[in-house]
């Protein structure tokens, strides 16, 4: 398993995530190279946007040598596609605004989060009378008015439990405001904010009977929220429908309060985190034969990796190749063991990169 902290040291032999052309879309590559005076990336031949009408053996191209991969070529950076920006009026936050999470290594054991970690995490709040609320699922803030979550969090509830609000800026559910003490330093966050939801949009092809295929939903808030150190959006990855690469072997992160439909006993008042390892699609299909293209799997190797995090909450990958270290929303917690005894049973996540076009199209169609 690759350590989330050591991934920055990997070069040709292991895949790295990098940000291309200043956009908030990471590209899979295996190191940097040059095509004449232009910068490029070492990629599998079939992944390069230039093929098939290019001579990869040209003297102007760097050679990509690897003891692991035999078909790497030097691929020029793809040009910025302005049409994508023109297609959508509503745009997502860019790196520098999204994906920022302050890590504090004074948190012993890596189980409790720092008060400033993962500021995009949201709690979904349900009520039957408008007075008392229960937080039963999680989500991720991706825009000042939009939260991304799992479809099963908004469709499988009892009739008397209606999703009404999203809570942002939360860390300890038993206190407000939240404060954390580091020796002589005391850090306090502003009070959390509860924002009403004015529109819920579930993917049109969500099918819970088929291993929760297309388990994704968007929540539009009734007002824009102000970004602070404790309320920030997470970055989204590049759109991709490829099944060639599913992050197998990568160390990712999940976090949350343990809010699930069934495992109410496992909740924690303080936001917790865990490192979780992605596994191959082939390995996951042994447990979940009906796995579809829009899903990835991770965890199942430890008890912690099966119960940390909330249904609908984020599976996160940090881009340690760039100095900013932005976090990207790789998956949405969808299906898996809910009793914290699921060793050997991985969790299934909705693969966010598969739904980028749906996310952008839906947000823009409902931005008025």
Image: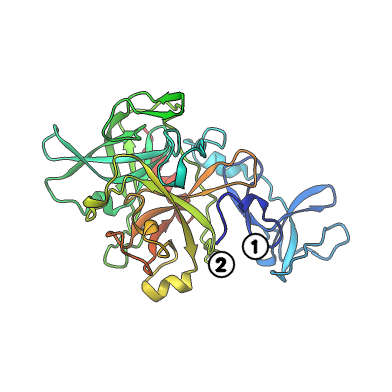
Task: Measuring from the top left, give residue 7's x and y in whole percent.
Answer: 61, 53
Quadrant location of the C terminus in the rendered image: top left
Q: Which residue is mark 1?
A: 47
Which residue is painted at 46% across and 24% down in the image?
184
Would you place residue 22 above or below residue 229 in this image?
Answer: below
State yes or no: discs 2 and 1 in contact (Cβ < 8 Å). yes
Residue 308 coordinates in the image, percent (x, y): 36, 52
> Whole-percent x and y of residue 354?
47, 57
> What is the distance, in whole Å, between disc 2 and disc 1 at their CAs?
9 Å
**Residue at 52% of width from left, 66% of height from top?**
243
Q: Which residue is mark 2?
A: 244
* Mark 1 closeness class: few <14, some 14–19, many ≥20 residues within 10 Å: some
Q: Quadrant of residue 164?
A: top left
Q: For the point 46% across and 73% down, which residue is it?
A: 283
In the foreground, 294 or 227: 227
Q: Which residue of the protein is positioned furthest toward the right in this rendering?
A: 59
From the viewer's perspective, is 205 left or right of 35? left
**Disc 2 secondary structure class:** loop
């Amino acid at each position: 398993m690759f350590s989330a902290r050591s991934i920055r040291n990997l070069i040709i032999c292991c895949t790295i995530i990098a940000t291309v052309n200043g956009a908030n879309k990471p590209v899979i590559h295996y190191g940097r190279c040059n095509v004449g005076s232009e910068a490029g990336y070492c990629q599998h031949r079939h992944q390069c946007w230039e093929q098939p009408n290019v001579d990869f053996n040209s003297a102007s191209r760097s050679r990509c040598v690897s003891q692991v991969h035999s078909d790497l070529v030097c691929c020029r950076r793809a040009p910025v596609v302005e049409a994508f920006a023109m297609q959508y009026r509503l745009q997502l936050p860019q790196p520098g605004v999204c994906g920022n999470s302050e890590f504090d290594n004074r948190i012993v054991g890596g189980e409790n989060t720092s008060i400033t970690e993962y500021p995009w995490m949201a709690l979904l709040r349900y009520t039957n009378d408008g007075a008392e609320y229960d937080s039963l699922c999680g989500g991720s803030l991706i825009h000042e008015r939009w939260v991304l979550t799992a479809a099963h969090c908004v469709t499988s509830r009892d009739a008397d439990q209606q999703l009404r609000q999203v809570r942002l800026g939360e860390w300890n559910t038993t206190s407000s405001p939240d404060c954390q003490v580091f020796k002589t330093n005391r850090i306090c966050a502003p009070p959390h904010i509860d924002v009403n939801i004015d529109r819920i949009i579930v993917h049109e092809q969500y099918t819970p009977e088929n291993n929760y295929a297309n388990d994704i939903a968007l929540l539009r808030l009734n007002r824009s929220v102000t970004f602070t150190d404790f309320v920030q959006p997470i970055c989204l990855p590049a759109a991709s429908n490829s099944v060639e690469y599913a992050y197998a072997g990568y160390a990712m992160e999940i976090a949350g309060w343990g809010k699930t439909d069934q495992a109410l006993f496992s909740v924690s008042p303080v936001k917790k985190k865990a490192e979780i390892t992605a596994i191959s699609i082939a390995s996951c299909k042994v447990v979940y034969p009906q796995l579809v293209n829009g899903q990835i799997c991770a965890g199942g190797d430890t008890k912690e990796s099966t119960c940390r995090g909330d249904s609908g909450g984020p599976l996160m990958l940090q881009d340690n190749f760039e100095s900013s270290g932005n976090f990207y929303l790789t998956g949405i917690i969808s299906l898996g063991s809910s009793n914290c005894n699921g060793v050997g049973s991985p969790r299934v996540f909705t693969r966010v990169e598969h739904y980028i076009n749906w996310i952008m199209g839906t947000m823009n169609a409902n931005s008025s």
